[in-house]
């Protein structure tokens, strides 16, 4: 088995975000990879209103999925669930989707479908530049309150500006209709409240809850490892 991790919005260096869990998986001979997302500037292309959007992220993740026929679990976080819904569709090697504080979009739905009319208070949007990001002052208190100070400090260096194009672009397929799917509700999440996650999770085949913040793969990596291995 291998694991393909898909990180969320407004961050870069996906392998860092997943590394505590990935290292524990490696101890059990489970390989993992975290594809680079162009919309977050990880491909080197300039981001912005005309920059790489959802379709570019889908292509990047799908290329990694198609590169091996080894049985694969896709673990998608937050915005990553939007990507996985399309990228994993029709890929025979994908045996399970694990969505963490994330979304299961129907065909035609986009990231904006799951948000409010106004941007969340922890986001900063630059309409002229065509990008958005998470406010540095809100990152720790909203998303990393249950992580240690070293991880919190390092995470502040991993914030990225992302193309606003990803907000409105709809998915063209919904892989979770055809692939076994588990939803991990993060009960102490201050960014996506648990009651909203539970609503999203109704579309999944199985639901698990942990008393964690938005990034359990950083704060409780052993629990996330155990869940992945169980799949």
Image (tube, helix red, strand yellow):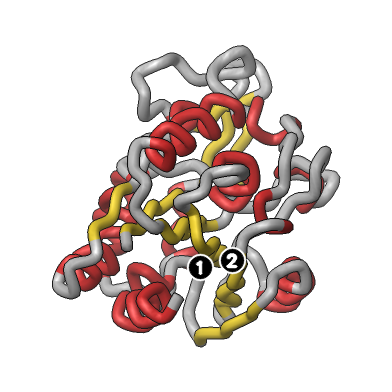
Please give the name of the residue rendered at 61% of the width and 67% of the height, measured from the top-left corner. 181
The mark nearer the N terminus, 1 or 2, is: 2
What residue is drawn where x is 39% and y is 76%? Answer: 224
Question: Disc 1 designates what residue?
Answer: 214
How far from the left and from the top, in percent, is residue 67? Answer: 35, 36
Q: Secondary structure at mark 1?
A: loop
Q: Image quarter for residue 108?
A: top right
Place residue 66 in its image quadrant: top left
Q: Is residue 200 above or below residue 177?
A: below
Q: Which mark is residue 156?
A: none
The C terminus appears in which quarter of the rendering?
Answer: bottom left
- In the visual, does 197 lie left or right of 137? right
Locate residue 229 relative to residue 47 in the image: left or right. left
* Position of 222 relative to 98 (above/below): below
Q: Residue at x 63, y 41 (%)?
A: 86
Of the pair 19 and 32, the residue shown nearer to us: 32
Location of residue 6 in the rendering, given as x and y in whole percent from the top left corner? 45, 49
**Residue 112 image offset from top left, x and y in percent:** 76, 42
Judging depth in this view, the residue of 28 and 90 nearest the camera is 90
Question: In the rendered view, would you say 209 is above or below 13?
Answer: below
Residue 138 in view of the camera: no
| Residue 24 appears in the figure | yes
Residue at x-position 61% and y-position 72%: 183
Q: Nearer the viewer, residue 214 or 58?
A: 58
- Labelled pair 1, 2 in contact (Cβ < 8 Å): yes
> What is the x, y in percent for residue 169?
72, 30
* Residue bearing mark 2: 101
């Amino acid at each position: 088995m291998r694991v393909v991790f898909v990180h969320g919005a407004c961050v870069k260096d996906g392998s860092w975000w997943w590394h505590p869990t990935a290292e524990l998986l490696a101890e059990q001979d489970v390989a993992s990879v975290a594809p680079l997302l162009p919309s977050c500037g990880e491909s080197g292309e300039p981001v912005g209103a005309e920059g790489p959007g959802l379709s570019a992220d889908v292509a990047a993740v799908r290329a990694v999925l198609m590169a091996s026929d080894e049985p694969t679990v896709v673990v998608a976080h937050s915005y990553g669930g939007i990507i996985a819904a399309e990228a994993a569709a029709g890929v025979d090697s994908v045996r399970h989707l694990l969505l963490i504080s994330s979304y299961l979009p129907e065909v035609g739905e986009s990231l904006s479908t799951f948000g409010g009319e106004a941007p969340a208070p922890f986001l900063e949007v630059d309409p002229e530049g065509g990008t958005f990001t998470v406010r540095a002052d809100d990152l720790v208190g909203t998303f990393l309150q249950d992580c240690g100070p070293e991880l919190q400090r390092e995470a502040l260096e991993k914030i990225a500006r992302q193309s606003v194009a990803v907000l409105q672009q709809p998915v063209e397929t919904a892989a979770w209709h055809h692939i076994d799917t588990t939803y991990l509700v993060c009960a102490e999440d201050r960014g996506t409240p648990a009651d909203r996650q539970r609503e999203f999770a109704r579309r999944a085949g199985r639901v698990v809850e942990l008393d964690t913040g938005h990034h359990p793969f950083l704060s409780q990596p052993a629990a996330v490892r155990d869940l992945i291995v169980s799949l």
